[in-house]
């Protein structure tokens, strides 16, 4: 059953430890950066670090890196729908004030 | 073909409607991820509400979010990441068929999750004492645009509350899995419930990875409050 072994790809423990240490380090980096005034860049930096942290959790802790292509596609589809939800609504809210739409 | 069919009947954990263990695991993984995608959209609605109101009332959100305790939030994030590591190591132990190690890591995961909720309860109590719970006695001392500050706290309690509810559901599942693991239900060949629960637990961790910066960190530096 060669395909069975592929399914249960065993991730070496040092990989988990490395991901864990990165996550801890990024948590304290993002906490510290939040006390430094970067203007509008603060939210950009905070969300970039969060997206990076979430990505390594999905890829290594949740084994998606070693998963089937169908699993990867479902994960990407979920993220894609979330982006649609957030960006279409926010694009509307952000741009309303640009043109002086009546009633606002 | 005939020999293959006979081979399948030897595996007690393989349901008869699957052709192989690999196919069965694939189906479980895909089903779990489909569920997690619905969870992404479930939390996504709350994240959208947060972004929409934050851009509508930036001053209220900036000063209200400074009422959260930054270092307590960071410490709690650390605790939750530790519980994700022990969960990943539990799945690793299960894949090697090490029963004692599996039970040990699952119990550690439970304890770390409990520690997280303990800190969260302390923070909720703190908000209660300072009248920062939206309602008749709501107060936001020194907040700008204080009339809209309850919006921030409603989202704070709604989002962290839904997250904590997911952790409580996780506790119940975790206790069941610990008992099953201790009784030797899982083998190196079949430990799908451990693996699927791991996906759920890591997902809850990811939600917190986004809640932490959005509720605790953004606008921390602009208002001068630390």
Image (spheres, coloured by chain):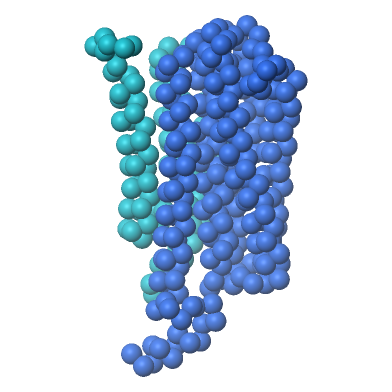
B127 sits to left or right of B47: right
Tell me which residue sits at (67%, 67%) in the image. B180
Which quarter of the rendering shows the C terminus of chain A?
A: top left
Residue A96 or B126: which is nearer the viewer? A96
Residue B216 sits in quarter: top right
Tell me which residue sits at (58%, 61%) in the image. B194
Residue A29 visible to an observer of this rendering: no
Tell me which residue sits at (46%, 50%) in the image. B36
Chain B shown in which color?
A: blue
Residue A27 sits in quarter: top right
Tell me which residue sits at (49%, 78%) in the image. B14
Residue A87 or A51: which is nearer the viewer? A87
Residue B164 or B1: which is nearer the viewer? B164
- Residue B19, image x, y percentages: 39, 79
- Residue A19, image x, y percentages: 51, 44
- Residue B189, image x, y percentages: 53, 73
B80 sits to left or right of A48: right
Colour cyan, chain: A
**Total label count?**
0
Residue B145 visible to an observer of this rendering: yes
Which quarter of the rendering shows the N terminus of chain A?
A: bottom left
A35 sits to left or right of B115: left
- Residue B134, image x, y percentages: 63, 21
Residue B193 sits in quarter: bottom right
């Amino acid at each position: 059953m060669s395909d069975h072994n592929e399914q249960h790809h065993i991730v070496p423990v040092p990989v988990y430890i490395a991901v864990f240490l990165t996550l801890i380090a990024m948590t304290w980096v993002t906490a510290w950066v939040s006390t430094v005034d970067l203007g509008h860049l603060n939210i950009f930096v905070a969300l970039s670090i969060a997206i990076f942290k979430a990505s390594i959790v999905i890829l290594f802790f949740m084994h998606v890196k070693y998963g089937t292509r169908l699993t990867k596609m479902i994960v990407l589809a979920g993220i894609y729908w979330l982006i649609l939800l957030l960006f279409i609504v926010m694009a509307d809210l952000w741009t309303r004030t640009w043109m002086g739409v009546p009633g606002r | 073909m005939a020999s293959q069919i006979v081979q399948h009947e030897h595996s007690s954990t393989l349901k008869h409607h699957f052709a192989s263990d690999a196919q069965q695991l694939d189906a479980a993984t895909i089903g779990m991820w489909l569920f997690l995608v619905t969870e992404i959209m479930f939390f996504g609605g709350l994240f959208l509400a947060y972004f929409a109101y934050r851009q509508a009332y930036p001053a209220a959100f900036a000063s209200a979010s400074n009422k959260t305790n930054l270092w307590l939030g960071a410490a709690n994030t650390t605790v939750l990441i530790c519980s994700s590591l022990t969960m990943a190591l539990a799945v690793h132990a299960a894949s090697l068929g090490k029963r004692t190690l599996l039970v040990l890591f699952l119990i550690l995961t439970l304890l770390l999750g409990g520690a997280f909720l303990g800190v969260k309860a302390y923070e909720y109590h703190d908000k209660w004492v300072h009248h920062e719970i939206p309602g008749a006695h709501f107060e936001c001392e020194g907040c700008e645009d204080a009339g809209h500050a309850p919006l921030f706290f409603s989202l704070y309690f709604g989002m962290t509350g839904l997250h904590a509810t997911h952790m409580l559901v996780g506790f119940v599942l975790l206790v069941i899995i610990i008992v099953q693991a201790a009784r030797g239900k899982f083998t190196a060949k079949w430990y799908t419930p451990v693996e699927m629960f791991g996906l759920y637990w890591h997902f809850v961790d990811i939600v917190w990875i986004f809640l932490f910066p959005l509720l605790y960190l953004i606008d921390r530096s602009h208002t001068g409050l630390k």
